[in-house]
Image (spheres, helix red, strand yellow):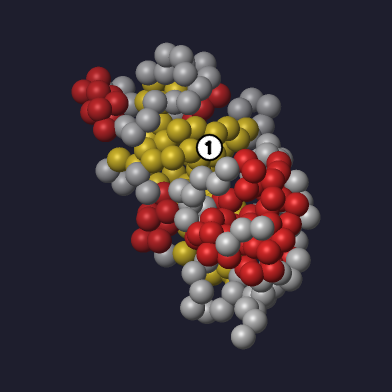
Amino acid sequence: MAEQTHMSATESLPSGDLGRRLAARRLQLGLTHEETAARADMDPGYLRHLEQHPDAAPSRAALLKLAAALETTLSALTGGDADLPPGPGQAGHDPRFTELSRTECGDLLSTHGVGRLAVPTASGPVIVPVNYSVIDGTIVFRTARGATPALAAGCSVAFEIDRIDDAFSQGWSVLVRGHARLVTDVDEANRLAARAHSTPWSGGRRDMWVRIDPYSVTGRRITV
């Protein structure tokens, strides 16, 4: 029986950015794995492997064949347009919007990552990305005196993280609102430095620690 060109409830979702892009483009063209593989002169099982395994490392030749088979470019297939803002696609079919529980929000915040910090300035609110860690139920980050994130100290701030899945037009976001305070105790600052998962990607000397004590944690998810 011919393969259906939509995903059944039991079929595994593509894993990894390349897999999602492959599957999204294939389904957009209404092609089965077999039809796509025939166009690209490869085994259908290998195509399924590429869609399902984020650690798959296809050769450039294989990617060029797939790009031609899917009537797209190598750059689009491999995320070469990643510098564009997320979310350029159309809304998914029958999207579902759900509120996330505090526990779900905590799971998504995880232990560390990059989030967006909204801080007040003399010329109005400014949003900047920061490397953060979650320690003892609070958001902590390090910055430099005089840098924009340092303006958060002593203020009520908003902190947001999100994940956008362009291939499926779905995603989630978590919003933390809380009071930010400068960590002035040397021992506490040393403990934070020892437990932090990453130094700031921006580099340089950034030894000023700021802790956000949350008073509100909310989240939402869109699935299709």
Residue type at the position of mark 1: Leu
**On the rendered structure, is 50 left or right of 216?**
right
- Residue that badge 1 annotates: 117
The quadrant of the rendering that contains the N terminus is bottom right
Q: Does residue 14 show up?
A: no
Q: Residues within 10 Å of mark 1 (few under 14, many from 20)?
A: many
Question: Most extreme residue toward the left, as rendered?
Answer: 187
Q: Is residue 153 above or below residue 38?
A: above
The quadrant of the rendering that contains the C terminus is bottom right
**On the rendered structure, is 224 left or right of 68?**
left
Give the residue drawn at x 71%, y 41%. 75
Give the residue drawn at x 62%, y 78%. 3
Give the residue drawn at x 50%, y 22%. 202
Question: Most extreme residue toward the top, as rendered?
Answer: 205
Q: Position of residue 222 (x, y in %)?
A: 59, 65
**On the rendered structure, is 208 left or right of 130?**
left
Task: From the viewer's side, name the closer residue of 54 and 40.
Answer: 40
Q: Is residue 40 above or below residue 176?
A: below
**Element carrying mark 1:** strand
**On the rendered structure, is 97 left or right of 39?**
left
Q: Is residue 64 above or below residue 9?
A: above
Task: From the viewer's side, name the closer residue of 10 and 183.
Answer: 10
Q: Position of residue 31 (x, y in %)?
A: 71, 69
Q: Position of residue 14 (x, y in %)?
A: 54, 62
